[in-house]
Amino acid sequence: MTDQAYLCLDNISKAYPLKEGTWIKTTAWLRAVNNVTLNIFRGETVGLVGESGCGKSTLGKIACGLDKPTQGEVILSGEKIGSTNDLLKSRKIQMIFQDPFSSLNPRQKVRNIVSEPMRIHKLGSKKEILDRTSSLLEKVGLSSIHMPRYPHEFSGGQRQRIAIARAISVDPDMVVCDEPVSALDVSVQAQILKLLKKLQQDLNLSYLFISHDLSVVKYLCSRIAVMYLGELVEIAAKKELYTTPCHPYTRALLAAVPVPDPAIKSRALLVKSEPPNPLSPPPGCHFHPRCPEKMAICSRKSPGLTHISPNQSVRCFLYE
Ligand code: SF4
């Protein structure tokens, strides 16, 4: 399976040193990502969900070369990536960020924002780049009349369209979308999700779609990976994850999705306490202090990944 994947994140870990004192000593390590393996295939959308601070954005940055793993390898089209620089240079993976208000340079006109990656990668003459900028803006639902304007002249949804035009300007195979709709109104969210789906069909893009919202992920993704405190705790095809979620944390996330029917009482959130401090994660299964189904073994040993079916794997003693 690994060698067929377009992008393979192979046993990735990332730890950040925390420094203190006059001599700037490393006093602790923050383990943001722990031994994560995730494959993404051409044309596929994989959702990566979890609470904020669980390490999903760090994994997204590693996937597109904006951060370097402490351990593990990034394999692109079957080739090991030697350094994060290789990934940045390859232009095959691009990223869309959460906040369209801060991800665009406020001092640059839209024309320059969208065309900059093409100029950096020398993808044509000045005129060719200008023509492509205009057609990219049309592709994302804007037009060439927006080229001389600045980001502050646009709404949040329009800014995210500009960010998407910029991301696809260099013809990537894959886009890492880091919470691309969470800063937008619900009605605008639907439009941006529809646009991402259409672009995927037109350009055969793969997406790694990072979100804390399982209803958003359901619309776009064919497979979903659930992350808790730096580890993948469940990976499943969409149908399996939404009909037979296995990990107690996945079930808690699904229970927390609001039901759009006032006649149906909102289901109780199974997980009540706050996530533990990632600087001192609990021993054994990291989820055990919050787990309604914990057993004696859960605080002593860490569960491995169990393959329940070809489409579903879970890290939990209930299935070992
Ligand atoms: Fe809960 Fe134990 Fe499964 Fe962890 S391993 S999720 S504590 S049942």
Image: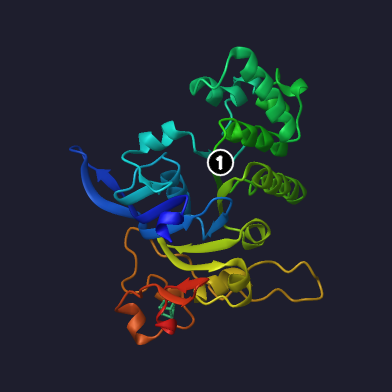
Q: Residue visible at 68% across and 36% down?
A: 161
Viewer-nearest residue: 72 or 274: 72
- Residue 55 place in picture, x, y as percent: 43, 54
Q: Which residue sits at x=41%, y=37%?
A: 87
Label 1 amino acid?
Phe
Give the residue pinned by disc 1: 97
Instruction: Tell whether 52 sits left or right of 261.
Output: left
Q: Quadrant of the C terminus?
A: bottom left
Q: Given the current orientation, which residue lies at the most extreme top position?
A: 126
Residue labelled 1 has its Cβ within 8 Å of some atom of ligand 1: no
Q: 254 or 66: nearer the eye? A: 66
Q: Position of residue 284 (x, y in %)?
A: 32, 74
Viewer-nearest residue: 16 or 247: 247
Is residue 101 at all visible to an observer of this figure? no
Compared with 302, 279 (above or below) is above
Foreground residue among 312 and 69? 312
